[in-house]
Amino acid sequence: MHTSYHQFFDKIFASTLSKAPFFSRGFGDMDAIERMIALAFDPHPPAQIEIEWVGDPVHRQGITSYRGKFTTPRQHGLELPPELETAYFELNAPWDIPFDVLETGNMPLCVYLAATTDQGFFPRRFFSAPLVKRGILSLVLMSPFYGKRKPAGQLEYVIETVSDQLVMNMVTVEETRALLDWFHRRGFKYLGVSGYSLGGFGSAYTAALTDYPIAAIPCAMGANPASVYLDTLFHKIVDWEGVHDSLPTDTFQESLDRFREVLEATSLDKLPPPHDPDCAIVVAAQHDAVVPVELAEQLATSWDCELRTFEAGHINGILRGAIDWRRAILDAFGTLMHKYPQG
């Protein structure tokens, strides 16, 4: 199909988001921004957390879901809205595997991070279900600022300040690293992380900061978040008036330059590749109008890892690219398990 067909859905999505644009309150807490920039590439070890399993397991369509929660790590030293202080997740396993067998750590486990607007567990549970049935456990983390973690007064998934977006990104990565560490310390040898779009960015960041081999399968993302907001049709989803009004600058160009400077300061290409790039596969949509495939190519080149593409845009790629994305996850875990056999 023609590029314009695939990008039609991207344009509709951007138009919808532009009706309640992001960053209406501008940059927000500049001190927090500077702190997050300073900490973004700090190779500190992941926080050690304690997980509390809550509620009864839920059985549905061949899968059992277990809910858990933990106190979010505070290594960044930032004051967080109270709604962010507890992290929630869902662990999905084949229905016929008892929990005590799961705890032995003999099954591979992949953490899935949320895309923009993905506030619950269902989309990622649905996507990962075929892989769960093939033996790869899925852990779906609820993002800060989303779902039950949405601060009072926030309109659904609309992030009000640049500092909130950076907090969202950093806390998500810190929580994911802590979860991987929790399972790693309990004997899980085959761990991985994946996500689509914003979730892909978080998964790539997590992989780059993890000091042991994991499977890394970021999808529909690029290393530089500034380019997504400034150089693609996602330019429409930002309240540039709000961004400009939050700075003591005379011209819009100065505001745009400052916006680019801040987001480029947390660009993924400033980090080293994952511990073993052979276990990483970057996946991208060929006709993506939100995260152009060139950005994925840059990351794959930087990591010296495999790049796979599928025929779709950013939005319809969530469904049209699902088979290719799942295959990449299977292959990345296959490489991990082949290179690092149990023993």
Image (spheres, rainbow, N blue to C red):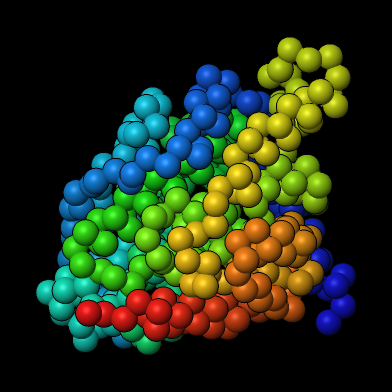
Q: Residue 163: x and y, percent?
A: 56, 30
Vertical position of residue 338 compared to residue 137: above or below? below
Residue 324 can be seen, yes or no: yes
Looking at the rendered image, the quarter that the C terminus falls into is bottom left
Given residues 57 and 218, the one toward you in this image is: 218
Residue 314 can be seen, yes or no: no
Given residues 207 and 120, the one toward you in this image is: 207
On screen, residue 184 versus residue 208, left or right, reads: left
* Residue closest to the far left: 100
Count of marks placed on residues: 0
> Which residue lies at the image location 80% right of the left edge and 51% below the top edge?
233
Q: Residue 50: x and y, percent?
A: 19, 49
> Which residue lies at the image location 47% right of the left edge and 33% below the top edge?
39
Q: Residue 261: x and y, percent?
A: 71, 32
> Which residue lies at the image location 66% right of the left edge and 46% below the top edge?
225
Residue 289 quadrant? bottom right
Q: Residue 190: x and y, percent?
A: 33, 72
> Which residue lies at the image location 50% right of the left edge and 39% below the top edge?
41
Looking at the rendered image, the quarter that the N terminus falls into is bottom right
Vertical position of residue 310 compared to residue 91: above or below? below
Given residues 198 and 17, the one toward you in this image is: 198
